[in-house]
Image: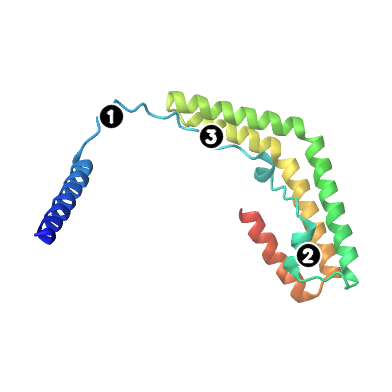
Amino acid sequence: MRTKLLVSILLFLFSLSAYAQYNRRQRIQPRGPVAPQKQRLPEIDVEKAVGMTFYNTEKVIKKIGLKKSMEAFDVVTSIFGRFNKELNQVKRINSFLFYEGKTKIEFARQESFKTKDYSVIQKATKEVTSTFEPIIEVVEEKEKNLDLELEKVLSSKQFKKWIKYKMSVKKK
């Protein structure tokens, strides 16, 4: 008798629980109209557009397999220190051009987003690209000089690793 009562109570509680869960899933919550979120435009990185890449010396040394005990370690460290310093100087000298180009492109993006006329962006991009051409040439020249200096100091295997690492950093 007691077992029948216990079984029937458990069966009742189990079916009540299952019914409650089923109803909770079936319930549709009324939602108001969803306001469209304002679409954010991606941030413009002028340094990346120009091709400026500042290398973390410790990471580079680790990637190319240089050890502190090697005689090339100090030379490579000084080469990267000098390279980063030169790029910082180029960045500092052209900071006004970078700011001007960034604001010009941002304004063109906002304008084209409002009017749905994308020729504004194309026009602004051409103008900014033409103002950045001399800076791009300077940065490329500094990169070539860096490669030449490293080629003299590193072994061929280490230099290949350097080129591979440089390409992976540039892709980012």
Q: Nearer the viewer, mark 1 or mark 3?
A: 1
Residue at 38%, 28% (x, y): give it.
36
Residue 79 in the image: state x and y as whole percent. 86, 58
Give the residue at mark 1: 31
Residues at marks 2 and 3, CA–CA distance in whole angstroms: 40 Å
Callout 3 crowding tier (Cα within 10 Å): few <14, some 14–19, many ≥20:
some
What type is the residue that disc 2 sits on? Answer: Ile
Verify CB contact (< 8 Å) between mark 2 and mark 3.
no
Q: Which of marks 2 and 3 is in front?
A: 2
Callout 1 crowding tier (Cα within 10 Å): few <14, some 14–19, many ≥20:
few
Q: Is residue 34 left or right of residue 9?
A: right
Q: Is residue 8 above or below residue 126?
A: below
Residue at 58%, 37% (x, y): give it.
43
Give the residue at mark 2: 61
Residue 137 in the image: state x and y as whole percent. 75, 47
Q: In this view, does 40 lie to the left or right of 169?
A: left
Give the residue at mark 3: 122
Asked where in the image residue 91 lies, by quadrant, the reply is top right
